[in-house]
Image (spheres, rainbow, N blue to C red):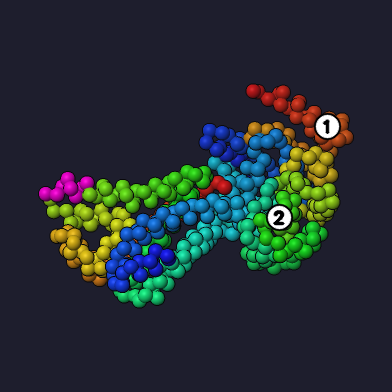
């Protein structure tokens, strides 16, 4: 569904993405992991068209995304840190986005209600706690029922109850055949959510396979252990 | 606004008030315009980023930002200067002042947007924007004075005319001064300008130049913004 071909991106002298190719298929959920500053967020932003790659090509449903913007209707994005206009009320924000996206097929307000955002819709954005902002971002990402969901550290800052609600929702969306791309540093979350793992290291993909294969390969049953084993193998092989 | 009321109380002649106001406005409007715009742009940076993740064209986002900022500044300017004028009585030169003030606001909002998209750093952007302001309000005038002084033996009307067209603040100033009938103070060159800018075609020329000053930085800024990484 999303094809990424030989993407390169430099910020000045720093090579952030170094010839990355990925094929993301609908119905799978991909865990994008890697150390801080390895290019995860840049990769996500390239897919969203926020960062324009130096070379290479990204296709969504077979169409190149360069200079396009309609394709973003198909993507629900939950940013790492949600920033909203300070003086806007939660209700106004939702109304505004509904207005912008003019979605013909039904809205998915499940998360909006599950997180009880309807009770606080008169609150202004700058009075919200970090966790509530995350809830707003999450509810917005799911609101338009998009076939692609990109979640940048979705569980960071959420309370345990909300984390479970969100994870349930992600799993249901995945079984409904959506493409999900998650970044996170919390392996136990990814264990429940992801079907594939992509490991980015200094702008290179050094591991990309399904999680079943990963576990079989390493002999560990827990994702965290399996990941650290496979990473230590691969990083020692890298020419430094 | 306070200064406008104050000046109207000091002096009952509208044109004199307009002239005093002009000197303040020509300095203050660009300054407020650039500072407010750059600060606004960087405060809404994350929001712009969020909007860009939505299916919206970049051009639409950028132009709506421009319209929003310039509208609020125009309203502030009109409320501050226009209302007292309305109260104390207007004449042609007062309306002229309002017009050139509004155009000048738009010009400097454009320039500030340009400086905002040129860099990621808020401090740098404000620095560039202030440099624009400093350049057009002070340095450029000094430069013109120097040119006029060093080549004072030559006929310089056309040259200075061209040079002045390259500075929006000077254009606005001349637009105003000539309507105020104080151009006689400027000697022969003033008379030449009076002949040029005082006519309708000259007035239109000055306004057209100012409109170009609005559009050109805006188009450049838009082009950069379309290719910018956020």
Principal secondary structure, stretch drawn in magenta: helix
Q: Secondary structure at mark 2?
A: loop
Check disc 2 and report the residue beneath it.
A128
Write the residue at 73% across / 45% down. Answer: A153
Say which label, 2 or 1, has the lower sequence index: 2
Q: CA–CA distance between discs 2 and 1?
A: 36 Å
Question: Residue B24, how many percent across, how many down?
Answer: 35, 59
Question: Residue B27, how many percent across, how many down?
Answer: 36, 56
Q: Is residue B197 left or right of residue A75?
A: left
**Between A210 and A50, the one nearer to me in the picture:** A50
Local crowd at mark 2 within 10 Å, few (<14), some, or many (≥20)?
some
Q: Nearer the viewer, mark 2 or mark 1?
A: 2
Check disc 1 and report the residue beneath it.
A225
**Between B78 and A74, the one nearer to me in the picture:** B78
Quarter of the view holding residue A73: bottom right
Chain for numbered disc 1: A
Query: What stretch of residues is rendered in magenta?
Result: B146-153
Q: Is residue B157 left or right of residue A237?
A: left
Write the residue at 75% across / 46% down. Answer: A157
Write the residue at 73% across / 43% down. Answer: A183
């Amino acid at each position: 569904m999303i094809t990424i071909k030989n993407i390169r991106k430099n910020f000045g002298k720093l090579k952030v993405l170094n010839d990355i190719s990925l094929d993301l298929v609908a119905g799978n959920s991909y865990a994008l992991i890697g150390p801080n500053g390895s290019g995860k967020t840049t990769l996500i932003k390239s897919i969203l068209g926020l960062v324009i790659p130096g070379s290479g090509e990204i296709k969504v449903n077979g169409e190149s995304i360069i200079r396009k913007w309609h394709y973003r209707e198909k993507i629900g994005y939950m940013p790492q840190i949600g920033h909203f206009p300070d003086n806007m009320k939660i209700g106004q924000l939702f109304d505004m986005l509904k207005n912008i996206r003019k979605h013909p097929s039904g809205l998915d307000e499940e998360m909006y209600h599950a997180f009880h955002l309807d009770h606080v819709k008169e609150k202004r954005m700058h009075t919200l706690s970090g966790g509530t902002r995350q809830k707003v971002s999450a509810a917005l990402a799911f609101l338009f029922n998009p076939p692609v969901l990109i979640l940048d550290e979705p569980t960071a800052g959420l309370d345990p109850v909300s984390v479970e609600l969100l994870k349930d929702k992600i799993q249901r969306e995945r079984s409904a055949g959506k493409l999900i791309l998650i970044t996170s540093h919390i392996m136990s979350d990814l264990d429940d959510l992801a079907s594939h793992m992509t490991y980015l290291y200094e702008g290179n993909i050094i591991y990309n396979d399904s999680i079943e294969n990963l576990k079989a390969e390493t002999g560990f049953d827990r994702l965290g252990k399996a990941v650290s084993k496979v990473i230590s193998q691969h990083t020692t092989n890298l020419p430094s | 606004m306070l200064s406008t009321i104050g000046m109207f109380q000091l002096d009952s002649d509208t044109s004199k008030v307009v002239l005093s106001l002009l000197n303040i406005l020509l300095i203050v409007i660009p300054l407020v315009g650039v500072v407010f715009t750059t600060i606004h742009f960087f405060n809404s940076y994350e929001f712009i980023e969020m909007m860009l993740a939505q299916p919206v064209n970049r051009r639409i986002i950028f132009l709506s930002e421009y319209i929003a900022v310039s509208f609020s500044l125009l309203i502030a300017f009109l409320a501050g200067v226009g209302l007292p004028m309305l109260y104390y009585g207007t004449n042609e030169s007062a309306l002229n002042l309002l017009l050139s003030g509004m155009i000048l606001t738009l010009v400097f909002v454009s320039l500030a947007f340009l400086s905002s998209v040129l860099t990621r750093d808020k401090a740098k952007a404000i620095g560039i924007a202030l440099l624009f302001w400093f350049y057009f309000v002070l340095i450029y005038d000094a430069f013109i004075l120097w040119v006029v002084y060093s080549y004072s033996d030559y006929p310089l009307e056309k040259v200075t005319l061209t040079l002045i067209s390259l500075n929006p603040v000077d254009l606005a100033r001349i637009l105003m001064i000539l309507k105020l009938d104080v151009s006689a103070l400027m000697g022969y060159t003033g008379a030449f300008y009076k002949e040029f800018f005082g006519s309708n075609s000259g007035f239109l020329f000055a306004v057209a130049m100012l409109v170009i000053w609005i559009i050109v930085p805006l188009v450049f800024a838009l082009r950069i913004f379309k290719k910018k990484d956020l």
